[in-house]
Amino acid sequence: MRNAKSSLLGAYLMASLVLLASPASHAQTTRTPSMPNMPNMPATPSNKPVIVADPTAVVMIVDRDSNDIAFMDIKTKQILGRTFLGNNVNPHMVMMSPDGRYVVTGGQRSNYAYIIDSRTLELVAKIPVGFAPEHLAFSPDGRWYYQGNPEGDSITVIDMQSLKAIKTIGGLAEPLNITFTPDGLKAYVGNYGAHWVGVVDVTRHELIKKIQVDTVPGIARLDPAKYLTEIKGIFNATPTPDGRFLYAADGDLGVVSVIDTREDKIVKVIRVGPDPWRLYMSHDGKYGITVNNGDSTVSFIDTAKNAVVASYPVGPDLTGVNFAADKAFVISSTTGFLYVFDMKTLKPAGRIKIGDNLFLQTATTDTADQKLYLGSATDNSVYIIDGQTEAVERVANVGQFPWGTHIMDSKDNYCH
């Protein structure tokens, strides 16, 4: 699906002619505050005005082609400000630190991580990382920022005290999403170029174990050059709310493997539809939903039984699932539809037409679990969907090619 998305993306870019790329300069030096503070400490004084007084009151929008992060006020739906990152950066994912002090993103084309002051929107650090950085995560205490570099098969570890890269974790295979345990002692890495989940010791920032999610077919093992040239492995290891178990979907194998984080062992392998992109966990942890792009279906897994209890057809090119108002909203990126399911009955509850000729991206849900904020790339908009009434409101001109959204403390912050 990742390769399919790239092909589809290329077609849209050719049609819209929105790329205004210019060479990125690697000669720029890293800018860091003179006295960086630990998370949860008073912020370093700045002579710039405070633009965002409450970090929980904004939606952050990743504008890929205008190379900026936009900050939208949740109440007024106005863009409060933007942080321009530089030419030809292509930010991919955005996240706010647990204490609300910093906002971070990785530039797919620049090979840098960017750290923004969440109040003044000032770019305070630009840090060299690995090749083509995409997905990222913070340790629960906010001390460590792990930046995944899938094309470089590595993770860059950034110390949020010094705002500097301190280590590169290698030995990975196209690492995408990173999941920390609640105590922050371990991190689990989904490797899209392999069929194992990496376990990282956060105290040493070292890869200490590989958890094979299932048996790879024998013919692929005999001739990997022929059968494994484009592996669709593990996009994400999705945790239960308490962090006790992880659910890792494998695209090639069509399974979800359940990992016990106490022993780092597989306790169950669940077969779902073909080419599952990842599993999305309901906010109460009772159900997980996989989006299966091989046959355009979704599979509902009961986490108490660790079994598929329902499967339904939906649209193609599925990019995400959000939960709000006791419903699940499944995003079909190229059809302009959200497919709705009642989470009490696990039954289809209709679909919502967002628009025509759109390229929908991913969404975040507000902290009240009532509204979704959905990025729509080709019309430069964010669509706000009321989970209860299913009313849709468009906020236009949020930036060029909005690639994703993020709200601090949302349970549905993810990326494609």
Image: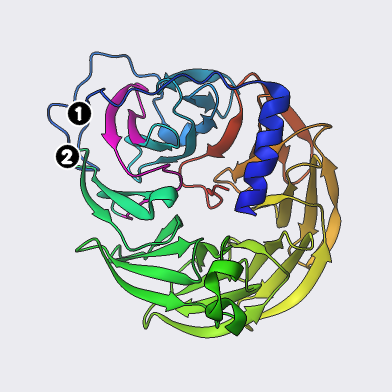
- In the rendered image, residue 87 lying in the magenta stretch gets the answer no
Q: Does residue 289 appear anywhere in the picture?
A: yes
Q: In this rendering, would 390 be left or right of 64?
A: right
- Which residue is at a point 34% across and 32% down the rendered structure image? 114
Task: Inspect the image, locate mark 2, and give the three-letter code of the amino acid beneath it.
Answer: Ser
What element does badge 1 sit on? loop
Residue 25: x %, y % from top left: 33, 22
Residue 45: x %, y % from top left: 19, 22
- Which residue is at a point 26% across and 22% down the rendered structure image? 28
What element does badge 2 sit on? loop
Residue 66: x %, y % from top left: 53, 21
Q: Which quadrant of the rendered structure holds the N terminus? A: bottom right
- In the rendered image, residue 137 lying in the magenta stretch gets the answer yes
Q: Does residue 372 appear anywhere in the picture?
A: no
Are dots 1 and 2 in contact, CB under 8 Å?
Answer: yes
Whether 389 is drawn above or below 170: the answer is above
Whether 335 is drawn above or below 252: the answer is above
Identify which residue, 362 or 77, lies in the foreground: 362
Task: Inspect the image, locate mark 1, and give the three-letter code of the amino acid beneath it.
Answer: Thr
Identify which residue, 295 or 100, lies in the foreground: 295
Measure how far apart labels 1 and 2 are at the Cα level: 8 Å
- Which residue is at a point 76% across and 33% down the rendered structure image? 358
Q: Earlier in the sequence, mark 1 or mark 2?
A: 1
Q: Which residue is mark 2?
A: 162
Q: Which mark is residue 32?
A: 1
User: Seen from this angle, which residue lies furthest left?
Assistant: 35
Pointer 1 local density, CA inside 10 Å: few below 14, some 14–19, many at least 20: some
Q: In this rendering, would 360 be left or right of 44?
A: right
Pointer 2 local density, CA inside 10 Å: few below 14, some 14–19, many at least 20: some
Q: In the rendered structure, which segment of residues is drawn in magenta?
A: 112-140
Residue 383: x %, y % from top left: 70, 32
Whether 229 is drawn above or below 8: the answer is below
